[in-house]
Structures are given as C-alpha cells and as structure tokens.
Amino acid sequence: KVKEVFASLFTDRAISYRHDRNFDHNKVALAATVQKMVRSETGSAGVMFSLDTETGFRNVVFVTSAWGLGETVVGGTVNPDEFYVFKPTLAEGKDAIIGRTLGSKKVKMVYSPGGGSEIVETNEEERERWSVSNDDVLELSKMAVAIEKHYGFPVDVEWAKDGDTGKLYIVQARPETVASRRKQSLKEEYKLLERGDVVTEGRAVGNKIGSGRVRILSHVDEMASFEEGEVLVADMTDPDWEPIMKKAGAIVTNRGGRTCHAAIIARELGIPAVVGSADATEKMKDGDEVTVVCSEGDTGVIYKGNLPYDRKEEDLSHLPDIPVKIMLNLANPSRAFEYGQLPNAGIGLARLEFVINNVIGIHPRALLGFDKLPAEMRSKILERTKGYADPVSFYVDKIAEGVASLAASVYPKRIIVRLSDFKSNEYKSLLGGPLFEPDEENPMIGFRGAGRYADKAFRECFELELVAIKKVREEMGLTNVEIMVPFVRTLDMAKEVNDIMAANGLRRGENGLKVNMMAELPSNVFLAEEFLDYFDGYSIGSNDLTQLTLGLDRDSGLVAKHFDERDPAVKKALKTIITAAKAKGKYVGICGQGPSDFPDFAQWLTEQGIDSLSLNPDSVIPTWMHLANKENEDDSSPK
C-alpha cells in the first residue's frame, strides 16, 4: 500500500496537473502517513475553507457537512449542509454562525460489510436535521483559523467526526488556490440584459454568465463527442472529467454542493457552474441553446436561449478622494460578501423586507398562530422550516442570519437596518398573508411602517424582528448594526416605537445602539428638529418624500413623468432636513433612489453638507468618479 501511495505521484491525472501548473516533476515530495481511521460512517464529514470560495471574502470560514464518509461531499454526490462563521466575533467567543443552509443529504457513504465502501440512501430524519451541531461548526472554524494562521494563507480543509466518540478530526489541509489569488481591487461584473424561460436552478459557483449548446454526458468515456464552448450537463463529475471541463462554456450538474469537484474545478478554470440542480439532465436535451447565470447570488439559473449580457471590469485600487461618504443600499445577504468589497463607508440601507420576502416567505402571524392554521398551510410551513426548532424560531433565526451576513460584509463599519416596511398588499403575498391582512384602497399611505409596530394586530410580529436584531448584536457580537424606523408619522409614534424597542431590550444608547429615523414624510420635514429628540439621526427616504411632497403615486404609470427628486419643492424639503440634523450635530444621510440615478443630484446633496450618500452597488463607482471630477474642476477653477 505504501508503494501505491508513492506511485500515485505518476498517474495521468497527477502528471497533467503538474504540467498545467508548471511544477517540476522531480521536485514534488510525498509522505505516506499512517493514522487512525475516523469512524465518520456513523457520524459526519465535510470540507471547509478559511474564506468565502465565491468572492474571496477573508473574514468568514465556510463549512460544509453531510452524513457518513466525506467522499460524498468532495465528489459531489450529495448536497451538503452549509455554514458561514464570522472570524472576528468567533475570536471574541460569540455565537459567530451568520448563515446556515440545510442540504438535502439524500445519500451517504458507509463501509460495506464485505469490505470497501458503498453509498446508501439516508432516512427522512437524517435529511431534515443538520448533520453537525452548531458547537461543532464553531469548533471546526477555530481549527480552520488556527491552520490558516500557522501556514499564513487561506486553506482548504477536510474534516471528519467520529460517530462513536463524537470527536472531530482534521484529515487534510492544503492551500486554497483560487479565490485567495484573485486581485481584490479588480472587480469583474456580469449583468444579464434580458430574461427568458427558466429551465432549472441550483447552487451558483462563481459570479459569471455563460451560454452555449447543451451536451449531456453520462460517462467520461463520451468526451470525444464534446465540443469547445458547449455547456456540459452531467449528473456529477470527478477528476477524470477535467479535460472536458476545460473546454466547457459552462457546467451544470444534478448533484453536488459548492465544495464538490465540479465546483472546485469550475472556479479554477473561471467557468460559470450550477451544481445540485437535481434535474438538469432531465430538463435539458442535447443541442438546446441555454444561458447559465451565476451573477445574481447563491442561486444559479439556467435560461432557455442564448441571452445577451454585459461584462464590466474595473480596477478600484486608486480611487480619488471625495468630500462625502459613500454607503451601500444592500438587502440581499447572498450578494453581501461580493458587494461589501466595493469601496464604502458601510451599508446605509438594509431592507428587512428582502429577507422576509425572499428567504422566509411566510407571514409572521401565520407562524405565531401556526396551530390554528388549515392543515394544508401547516404542511407547507413545516416543509419550509425544516431544521429549525419551531416555525417562530425559523422566522427569528432567518432574519438574524440575513442581517448578520450583511453586517459582517462591512464590519466594523456601520450598517443601518430598516425595520420592516411592507405595505398590506405586499404582506398579503406571503404564505398565510390573505388570512391576516386588510384590503386597503391605497396601501402606499396605509397600514405600514411605524404605524404597524404598536398596533395590536402586528405588535407581536414586530417584536420578533427586535428579538432577531438583539440576537445579532448581543449573541453574534455584530454591534455595528444600527436600527432605522420607517414611516414615522407623528412625535407620539416616535416615542411609542422607542418604548417598544426598549421593552424588548433594544434601548437607544445602550451598548452603543443607535436608532435612526427614515425621514420621508412632510411631517418629518415640518418637525425636523423635534423628531431628533427621539432619534440619533436621519436617513432620508427620497422616494416616499418625493411622492408625498408632489402628491403623486409612484406606482402609477399615469403620473410617473412628474416624479423627480430634483424638483425644487423636494430639494427645499431635503435642505430643511439636512440643516436641522447638522444644527444638532446628528447624522444625516440619504438612501433613496435619486443619488443612484442622477449624479448631479448626488453633487447637489454633497454641497448641502449631507454626511453620506447610500447608493445601489452598480452606481457606486460612476457616482464616485463624478463627484471626484467635479471636485477637481472646482479646485482648478479661478478663485
């Protein structure tokens, strides 16, 4: 067996690997180690990285896990559980798990009675619970950080848990050679210009877009039929498939997670890949034209047809100074580690509704009153909340994980989290929503924002949001999280909301907590000084402020042409808010759409002395450069 170990240096695959990377065949060393066999067939195993594999974000450990021997995770035969752990708060002893995804884990590898190993199906109970505990994830992450510190570079680590003893073991560690070697200041962005019919979805690998003709292969022996630039579609891949993968325009597999072989090779080659789709080989056929999109977060989507897309590359290493802070409007946790690497002073608007709508998808009152719901709806909710202690815990934990991921992406810079501001028609679209929401003629100015929080029909739901925010700040340790309260109509409402937050352990000023108000109503303008008695600053919501100042419905196409944040009346309102905040020495920023759309408007706001402009990620660099050029023009003009 020892001879076989040394002989493995000269397999076709090993020789090809060294040749491609210019390694000297005669200078490669190998040791044959003898170690205890970890009985993970009765426990679990997986792979972890000491950075985010998709974005190169260095402040997290990414852990994957599945039942049985680890080969199923490495080989891509299973969709594993996934965890993100935030390094800075892990070092402080906090509960630093900021993201969790329950994998399907349909199979596991165990030892065969007659020797060797075999793959067997997992049972329903194994599929519906986490294959590793939170405590184990934290302990594994500490090991990954220690290994990274020892070697001085990011690492790719395989681990196993002995099911008999409960002990954790590191079985392999090696350098991470893809994400860690990217030039972080060089940002490449792909953007789909039009959409088509969705064929299937899975986990996105990388952030690119690719298109081409489908070629379905069931075995590596069929590689001769594969042509350059085709989209490789397979159940799964292993190292023998690498020559085919090098020729592919994109890769799609039925099985596998983001640390499987197909994902690792796709990253190395810079090819977009979607893994774990479950049904790609059934939904597609040879010769189909498809577009594989991995540029929109965790979910990779395959569309019918060859769709147009844009590719943009920017070097952010030498941006000029500007006279205002640029923050981000960012609500999607799955894009946080990517966009958080843009130049920024933090996140100026993180909308809680995005997590509630896209990650949870269930009305909070349906979760609070779960036992009284119709049987069919209870069944749907139980399906969505697998892996969590109960439906309410699912709601709280998912909000906490979403906020924590966003906060981690810019830590220790501030993140201003706007509490929920769904309108009744939007809440009604959630599972269970029609049972609890009123019919309103004009939801835009109806039961929304702070007006909901103290109402007996919603207060208990609001308090769940507060439990989640408190968890992020205190248990997870992300104290850079600030709160923003939307649609505060009156001073009494401002006081009442502050009282509710304080009663739920979120008292303004305690543990450094800042509570801001979204200034977006005419009453906020007229009483700009008075509202600051209840808040630490303003974040101006120019969208609602514009529609309510000009008396128009921004959702109506009939009056859309009159909607303009640069209208003199709106500018006068904005100046009033900015002046009041500056006079009291309090923060004032803007997070509406205007500065992202109109660089001249951003310039005007800067001239009024606003502290920050919170922009959509795709507007950060264009607006930054516009302000820098304007500053240079002013400096060079005759005095």
Image (cartoon, helix red, strand yellow):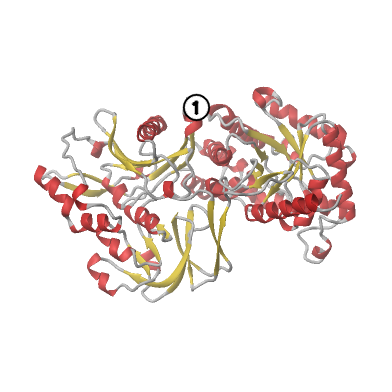
At label 1, counting other C-alpha atoms closer than 10 Å, the crowd grade (few under 14, some 14-19, many 20 or more) is: some
Q: Tell me the residue that label 1 is attached to.
A: 94
Placement of the N terminus among the 4 image quadrants: top left
Residue 430 drawn at (x, y percent): 61, 50
Residue 23 drawn at (x, y percent): 26, 52
Left or right for 262, reference 568 = left
Front in this rendered view, residue 106 or 512: 512
Could one spot residue 524 in this view of the protein? Answer: no
Residue 458 drawn at (x, y percent): 69, 38
**Amino acid on which disc 1 is placed:** Lys
Residue 555, quarter of the rendered image: bottom right
Name which residue lies at 66% across and 26% down: 512
Name which residue lies at 39% across and 39% down: 153
Name which residue lies at 41% across and 59% down: 270
**Up-down relation of residue 394 to residue 286 (above or below):** above
Residue 159 drawn at (x, y percent): 30, 38
Residue 350, quarter of the rendered image: top right
Left or right for 120, reference 458 = left
Secondary structure beneath dot 1 equals loop
Left or right for 528, reference 376 = right
**Residue farthest to the front, as pictured:** 638
Left or right for 116, reference 480 = left
Residue 551, quarter of the rendered image: bottom right
